[in-house]
Amino acid sequence: MPTIDPLSLDAHVVACGFLGEAAVFALGDGRVVIRVDGADRTVPAHDGGLLAAIFTANGEALLSCGDDGRIARTIADGTSETLFEKKGKWLDQLALGPQGAIACAAGRTAWVRLAGGEIVEFGHEKSVGGLSFLPKGSRLAVATTDKVVLHWVTAKGAPVDMPWKGAHTGVTVSPDGKFLVTTMQEPAMHGWRIDDMKHMRMSGYPTKVKSVSWSAKGRFLASSGANAAILWPFFTKDGPMGKNPLQLGPRDRIVTRVACHPSEDVVALGYDDGMVMAVRFGDAAEVLLRRPGEAPLTALAWDGAGVRVGFGTESGEAGVIDIRG
Amino acid sequence: MADSSSPIPVTVLTGYLGAGKTTLLNRILTEDHGKKYAVIVNEFGEIGIDNDLVVDTDEEIFEMNNGCICCTVRGDLIRILEGLMKRKGRFDAVLIETTGLADPAPVAQTFFMDDDVRAKTRLDAIVTVVDAKNLLARIDDSPEAEDQVAFADVILVNKVDLVSADDLAAVRAEIAAINPYARVIETERCAVDLGDVLDRGAFDLGRILAVEPEFLTSGHHHHDETVKSISLTAGDMQPEVFFDWINRATQEQGPKIRRMKGIIAFAGDPDRYVVQGVHMIVEGDHQREWKPEEKRESRLVFIGRDLDFEALRAGFDACRA
């Protein structure tokens, strides 16, 4: 039986994850809570609201941004430093490149902080809804209204527009760099095959898609927004075109978060009643990880070894599930 | 502080340049009225307040991908409200200031069209600040000024000390001709009891019932306004026929409709049914039981530009039970 180490954080959990053994929770009120061996350390990472947070691929640091206009880098011992600052701007988007580059955005402007500390600014006609680096890290995809723009992070080459009408609220790129997918203001996702800019429409969701996660080796893209996790197949050259998605963990509730296991064909799902489940792709076998709670699940993440799941909710209920029991 | 599960009230502040919006905003931000506001502004420079809950934004309007041309929303607001909801508990209410020339429709529609915004917030009132000296001229030269009056739940007539009694009477008559259902407050330098402006309770339904339709026909205003209102009344209505008609009517006349609000008594239904809308968007819900001493009466108000009043009246009358 999985065990749960619960926390009560009294704030919207924006993101959670792991820095080595430590479970880390980034909270909407600006705090970062680090839990090691049942003891909590609280870091006041932002003076104001924390709007987005992301973990570095090597599991060394949490990067967060907020309405104090700062990107903070916090490590497991609670040390926090400022990497970037734009006073008076609400930084609400954050992405990490493979070579230490960081992208953030406020309103219509996106910035890239290259690994060396150099800052490059990218203006847009409309607000930036999402950011994602392409796998090699030389290009940044910016989701905005009516299009995605592919910038060269050094701004040395001309950007490429990828038009599709509507407000794009998030963007993700497949690990092999072949596909780009946006979430939209409408309850749908839109995809492009980057080579030939072929379009893919992924629709049928009852609500907006707010959480997506690539499965191991990028075989499936799992998404929230429906009464089950919707997993679109991306393992052939045509991606999900003409194929039906997997629908895992069907319930009469809406899935609000998805997190694919780092190596196995398993996805963790969080629902709008706070329940957490893990489901295997092949036979749709389900394991209950957490019973329904008070509030919708807003954060969900596996550790690097794929044995612990961190979760958090809108009202601040949070915890660490150990599936080893 | 607000309970974390209850929707946060949102007040929208409109008014053309120079009417006194900023004066009112500064008062709300500085005075001790016992509430903490998160304020969304678009002319940051004008507010001299250092407050971490003031956010500036560029008004960004886009059409929803649903084939309806008047279903426009404020994309920037959806994002900012989403960010604010992550720190719920830090503030009691939200105040949104629009630019002087803004059409109030996209702001209002954001609260109907976006599911997340709808779930977490509640449009408390649209407050329009006008100045007594310039209102008539503005209505003549800008449709936006007329629309701002048409959309309002509360109209603050500012600078009344700068006009004669006759001019003020003309301003009152003009407002009544466009939107007799708004609560009108006359002030100097926005010196208003903030309680009259804030936390009004979405649509001031009491006023729909209190204002008599005859009030509309009083013709002592000199303007030839294109935005007018109609109030329709009846007893019990047939629900199926009514829903079918209201959906059709708002589709047909949607671009002309500014606001629609009403209370409906459905035959055999013990509850009051409340409807409201902007352009083609209609929303309705059971509100509460009719009280024993209350007269079961349906009343529906449309405010709009060049509305076909005859068609609306005929359609409404055909829904009577």
Image (cartoon, rainbow, N blue to C red):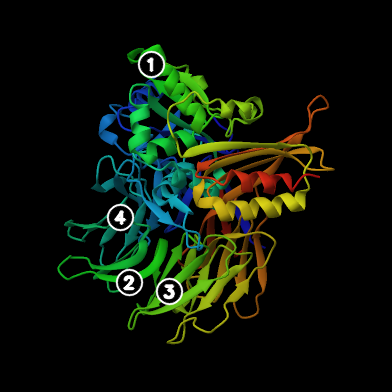
In terms of secondary structure, where does tag 4 sit? Answer: strand
Q: Find disc 3 in the rendering and name its residue.
A: A191
- Nearest to viewer (mark 4 / mark 2): 2
Query: Which mark is nearer the camera, 2 or 1?
Result: 1
Q: How far apart, in angstroms, are the residues tagged by discs 4 and 2?
A: 20 Å
Given residues B304 and A42, the one toward you in this image is B304
The answer to whether residue A295 is seen in the rendering is no
Please state if A320 lies on the left or on the right of A49 as rendered.
Answer: right
Residue at figure coordinates x 41%, y 62% from the top left: A168
**Dot 4 and dot 2 residues touching (CB under 8 Å):** no
Residue named by callout 2 = A162
Q: CA distance from mark 2 to mark 1?
A: 54 Å
What's the chain of the residue with tag 1?
B
> Where is residue A214 shown, x and y percent of the image?
46, 72
Residue B11 % position (x, y): 48, 33
Q: Residues within 10 Å of mark 1 (few under 14, many from 20)?
A: some
Are discs 4 and 1 both within one chain? no
Mark positioned earlier in the residue sequence (4 or 3): 4
CA–CA distance between discs 4 and 3?
22 Å
Q: Is residue B244 left or right of residue A212?
A: right
In the foreground, B80 or B193: B193
> Any mark on residue A263, and which?
none
| Residue that numbered label 1 is attached to | B160
Where does residue A10 sit, x and y in percent of width and height? 53, 39
